[in-house]
Image (cartoon, rainbow, N blue to C red):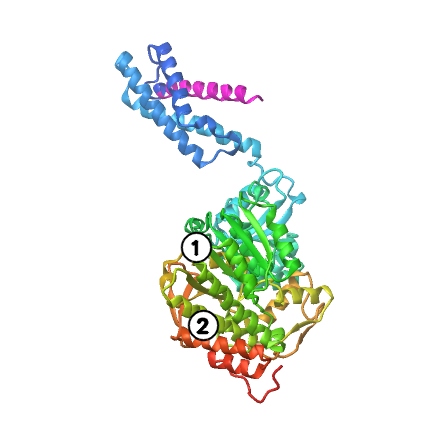
Amino acid sequence: MHPFIRLISVIVIDAIIGVIAFFAAFYLRLEQLPNYSLNIIIVILLTTIFSFTILGVYKRIWRYSSTDDLLIITKASILSVLLSAFILFVMIRLEGIPRSTMIIFFILLTLFTGGIRIGYRLVIDQSLAPIREINDRVKILLIGAGDEAEAFIRSSHKADGPYYIMGVFDDDKGKWGRKLRGVNVIGPPEQLNTIKYKNFLQSKNITKIVIADQKISRKTIELLLKFCDKNGVTLSRLPKISELNSTVANNQNEVRPINIEDLLGRAETRFDKSALISLVKNKVILITGAGGTIGSELSRQINDMSPQKIILTDYSEFALWTINDKISSQLRSHSIIPLLLDIRDINNVENVFKQHKPDIILHAAALKHVPICENHPLEAIKTNIIGTKIIAEQAKKYNSSMMVLISTDKAVNPSNFMGASKRAAEIYIQGLDKLESNTKFITVRFGNVLGSTGSVIPLFQNQIYRKGPVTVTHKEATRFFMSVREAVELVLISLTLESNKEKGGITVLEMGEPMKINNLAKQLIRLSGLTPEKDIKIEYTGLRVGEKLHESLFHDDEKKITTDHPDILIAKSRDIKIEKTINFICNMEKYILENNSHKAIQELMLLVPEFNIDPNSNLP
C-alpha cells in the first residue's frame, strides 16, 4: 500500500473511532443519543485528527505497537477530549452533555484507538498462537529471567520463530515458580544437575541452552559447560550490547556460541566516552607497538574518536601493514600515518616527534614474552626501559600533553626479566610524573588479555587443533584475564579521571578474580566440542624459569586508592627519586654498550630491589 493511502486510511479509522467513542460514552451515560449530532461529529472528527497528528501518533508503526505507543495515544486522547469540550462549550455551552460524558469519552477513545493497534500487531505476529508447529522448532532452556530473556521469548513467540522455550532458570528466588511471558521460571541453574532435569532434557528433546543473563558468573558458566558436555547439549548466549549490529538488533532470535571472553564471567559495562572524545578529538595521537594486540585495539578505538591524525608505529613490518590495512578502510575524515619505528633508535624517534609533534602518546611497544626475555635480558632492558626513556624524553622535549605507559601485572614483585624491565619503566614514568612539566605521564597496569600474541589462549587452541596434548605448567597456577576490548576501553577512560591528577600513582585495572589456567584449558577443550582427558589429554610441564604460580596487581607497599570508576584503581607506591632512576638507566645503557651484561643486570636489580636473582647463576 502506498504510504499516503495508508496514512489517509489510518486517519479515517481514528476519526470514525473518535465519533463512535463519543456517542458510545453519551449513550452509556444517558441511554440516548445527543442533539446537535452533526456539529458534534464535525468537532470530534477534527479534534481527534488534530490531536493525533500534533502528538505524532501517525508517525508510529502499527506493526510494532507497544506500551510506548499507548502512552502517546493516551496523551493524544486527553488533548482531543479537552479540545472537544472547549469547542462544544463555545458552540453550545455543552448543553445536554453531562461533564462525566467527557471522562467516559476519554476512556473509550484510548481503549478503542490503542486496542485496534495492539490487535493488529497480535494478528500480524500471530502471537495469539505461539505454540503452532512446536515440533519444527528447536527446544531450548534459558538461563536468566531478566529483560534480555523477556525480549527473546517475545521474539520467539512469533510464527516464524526458530525456538520454543521450555523453561527458564534464574538465581533470583523471587522469580521461582512464576512465569515470564507464559514460560515457567523453574529455579537456579544448579538444579540442572539433578536427575529430574536430566530426564526432563531427554523426554522433551531439548538440544540447546541459551544464556540470557549478561551478568552470569564464571562459576555458573563452568557448571553449564560441564552439564552440556555430559548431556550432549549445546551452550549459546545472546549477544552483548557491544556485539549488536544492524542484523542482530532487528532479530532477537540471534544467538551465538560461547566464546573465550564468556569464560571470564564479567558483566559488561558501558562507558560514557564524552570526556574521552573531547580529549582525543582533533589531536595528533602516536601509538607505539600499534601492530600488537593492545596497540591494534587502541588504534581501532581511537580511530572512532575523530583525532586529527593517528601515527601508527611498529618495529614489525608485517604487523604495521596489517593494522594499517584494517583501520584505513574505516577512516573518519582524518589521516593515518604508518611508520616503521624502532623505539630504541633515538634519532629515528626524534624525527617522528619533530615532524608530527604528537599531543598524546600511547606507548604499547614492549618485549612481553617471558621465556624470550629470560634468554635475552639485555634486549628486554633496551626495549622496555631504554626505549620507554627515549619516548618519554621526546614527549617532554616536544611538549606533548600526555604519555601513557602500558604496563603489566608481571611488574609486581617481578621474578623474570620481562617483569623487572617493565617495573623499571614504571618507576621511571612515575618519577617523571612527579616533576613539574607540560607533559602528564601516566602508567596503566593490568593482567593478561585474552588471545593476545604469545598468550596461553592461542597456544591451547593450536594444541587442541592438533588433537593435544594441552600443556599446562601447574594445576594450581592462576592468571588475571580480561578481554582486549574492555582492557583498552578502561585504559582510555582512565585518562580522563580526576584521580590522574595525583602525581606518581599507577592506574591499575580491576581484573576480577584470577582464573586457574588448568580450568581455562579444560573449558577451551569443551568449547571445541571435546571432553578433557578423554578426547584431549592435559600434561603438566612445571613452571618455566621466571614464572610465578600466582600474579598480583599490587605490591605489598603500594597503597590502593579508589577512583570514580569501579574498575579503575590507583596504586600509590614508594617514593623513588627521578635523579637516581635516571642514573641507574644511564648506567645500564653504558654497560650494554660495553657488552657487560652482568653489570647492566646488577643496575637493574639496584633499581628494582624486589627483583633478586642468584648472582652465581649463568646469566645469558
| Whether label 1 touches label 2, CB < 8 Å | no
380 w.r.t. 169: above or below: below
Residue 493 in the image: state x and y as whole percent. 44, 56
Q: Is 359 located above or below residue 118 in the figure?
A: below
Give the quarter of the image for residue 566: bottom left
Asked whether residue 192 appears in the rendered view, the answer is no
Q: Secondary structure at mark 2?
A: helix
- Give the farthest residue toward the right: 466
* Point 30% across, 15% down: residue: 88
Q: Quadrant of the N terminus?
A: top right
Horizontal and vertical percent for residue 164?
60, 46
Residue behind mark 1? 174
Mark 2: which amino acid? Ile
Q: Give the amino acid at mark 1.
A: Gly
Secondary element at image label 1: helix
Viewer-closest of 477 and 134 = 477
Q: Which circle marks residue 427 in the picture? A: 2
Q: Residue at x 53, y 45 (%)?
A: 334
